[in-house]
Image (spheres, rainbow, N blue to C red):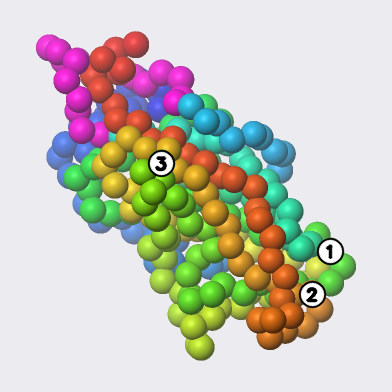
Amino acid sequence: MKIMNKSYLFLLFSLFLGGCGENNDPFLTGGVSLGGTGNGTQSPSTGGGNTVPSIPSEDSSPIGDYAIWSPGLVNSSCNGLNISYQLLDNFLDTPVDLGDGTMFNSEDKQANLKIKVTVENTSNQTVYEYFKECLSPLKFSSSDQKLLFSSNQISCPNSEFVSIYRPSEIKTYYLQYNLPGKALYWNSQYESQYSLGQFQPEELRSTCSASDFNLNVEEITEEMLKN
């Protein structure tokens, strides 16, 4: 959903006030699926988005909802893997373009941040990626020093999940998070360990820092919606 689509967002805002019900999207179960590719690279956006649609009102008081502004498609390379990140629309589950946004309701207890992570092995060797403590490697830290971890549950033995990427193989992860109802800037951290060719004990694995996928969250006021 492009947040500047006025008629559609007004309808979604009405749904917010009335309650959204169950969301049965398959990737909300925390699973991992194969397929999908990313193309192109865009620099992360550090500020707010463009405009948001108007909602009739007598004043400019806050409506209690928030916008997540998209940094676009962000790519990075790490030990033979190309990793791309995209913000997904909270209602359509489609990628949100650079400068556009998606809304969430601060009173909604469901996941309100969805991210598509695509990992492609661009090397000629099998790559092993290790997720420590069964957690997604993509986490966020806020401008007020809070940490945000994915709510996806990964079933794995020995407190470690290993993903194996054969040459040219692509895997797509759909991650979800629960953002607090607060205007904040979120910096991403992608942390995992790697080995090439074969499984290795922890002391023989390598690490690297992936590109930042940063998000700006702003509270939406009716004054903003009138612009």
Cα–Cα span, label 2 and label 1? 9 Å
Residue at 64% x, 34% y is 43
Q: Looking at the picture, which amino acid does disc 2 mark?
A: Leu
Q: Looking at the picture, which amino acid does disc 1 mark?
A: Ser
Q: Residue 143 — which label?
A: 3
Q: What x and y, as percent, mark residue 189? A: 54, 54
Nearest the eye: 187 or 2: 187
Q: Is residue 54 magenta?
A: yes
**What kind of element bears circle 1?**
loop
Cα–Cα span, label 3 and label 1? 36 Å
Nearest the eye: 216 or 171: 216
Q: Looking at the picture, which amino acid does disc 3 mark?
A: Ser
Cα–Cα span, label 3 and label 2? 36 Å
Examine the rendered structure and indicate whether residue 2 appears above or below residue 211. above
Mark 1 highlights which residue?
Answer: 123
Q: Residue 196 — which label?
A: 2
